[in-house]
Amino acid sequence: MLTNYIILFGLLLLILMVSCRPPECQVDNVDFLTKVRDSPIVLLGETMTKNMFPNAMNQFNVTFQVSCIFKGKPTNHTISISQAGFTSGRNYCQDLAAGTTYIVFLEERHDVYRPMDFQEIEYSNNNNSTLELLDKTCNLTHLKAKDYAIDECPPVSTACYESKMDTIISSKHGGDDAHFRDYLTSSHPAIISGDMHYEQLNVSSNIHPIDSVQDESDATLNQQRGKSQFSDEHQHPPNHVSSTYQSFIVLISFIVACVVFVQ
């Protein structure tokens, strides 16, 4: 009889451990350019406070002090970011430790900010790789918070242009120059490797900064998605693997307990 109680206690302990198992987050390997492109708001700033939700495991709000706006409309110097951490139906989690500076990727509706389905990037003036990303990524702005006078923005690549060029290309390796020339003279920007030499003959006067059409680009992107920015159920199908696993463990434990007591 004592053995039965020990087995039952062990099963109850197993159920408790499974139920309290923290959610698993995927490693965010999304590149910086994609995060910037797919996020309506990109900010640099410091997490001031971090408050856990009382009724939601691993979800929290933070008070965030904005140092620079890389993308999006001007914000206040201090904002609140809601529903950070683990959110059901999303792939990635946020950490946003207090006292740490981050580049965050947000969405906003009615002055309510919350993370996109990306992990934030920790920022430091001594991190050369992050500084290089900011320096080489087009389509960034260099704006202060609207109620903050000090400019704390790092160098960013604001002088990115798209242009239409007529180009003559000569290749060291005898590639298909005509095809490549047609590609370069299209409206899409191109990256030319060190193996290709080209001479620019003329550049159209119709040159404009990419950031001047940012609103149009964001609108087009949202139309292509056809989904609400705040609807996780539409952005990502819910992940029921964890809940199904827990239910399975509970069911097996219940069956074993019944068998033990019948014996």
Image (cartoon, grey):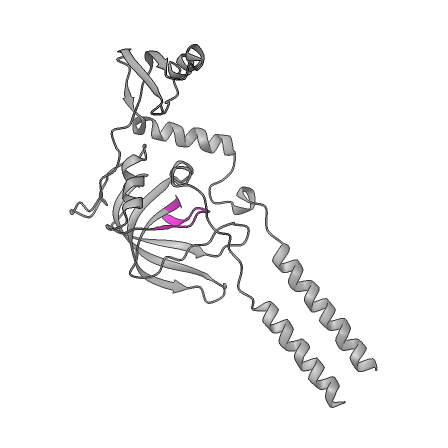
The answer to whether one can see residue 203 in this image is no
Q: Nearer the viewer, residue 216 or 131?
A: 131
**Dividing the picture into quarters, in which one does residue 185 lie?**
top left
Which residue is painted at 37% across and 23% down in the image?
Answer: 190
Q: Which residues are magenta?
A: 105-122
Q: Name above or below for residue 251 compared with residue 173.
A: below
Residue reaching furthest to the left: 149
Q: Name above or below for residue 156 compared with residue 12.
A: above
- Quarter holding the C terminus? bottom right
User: Where residue 9 appears, x then y in whole percent?
Assistant: 67, 81
The answer to whether one can see residue 60 in this image is yes
Q: Name above or below for residue 253 compared with residue 94.
A: below
**Dividing the picture into quarters, in which one does residue 141 lie?**
top left
User: Where residue 195 appears, x then y in whole percent?
Assistant: 36, 22
The dominant secondary structure in magenta is: strand
User: Where residue 120 appears, x then y in whole percent?
Assistant: 38, 50
Residue reaching furthest to the right: 263
Residue reaching furthest to the bottom: 2
Does the magenta run of residues contain 194? no
Q: Nearer the viewer, residue 194 or 190?
A: 194
User: Where residue 230 appears, x then y in whole percent?
Assistant: 47, 45
Which residue is painted at 40% across and 40% down in the image?
Answer: 39
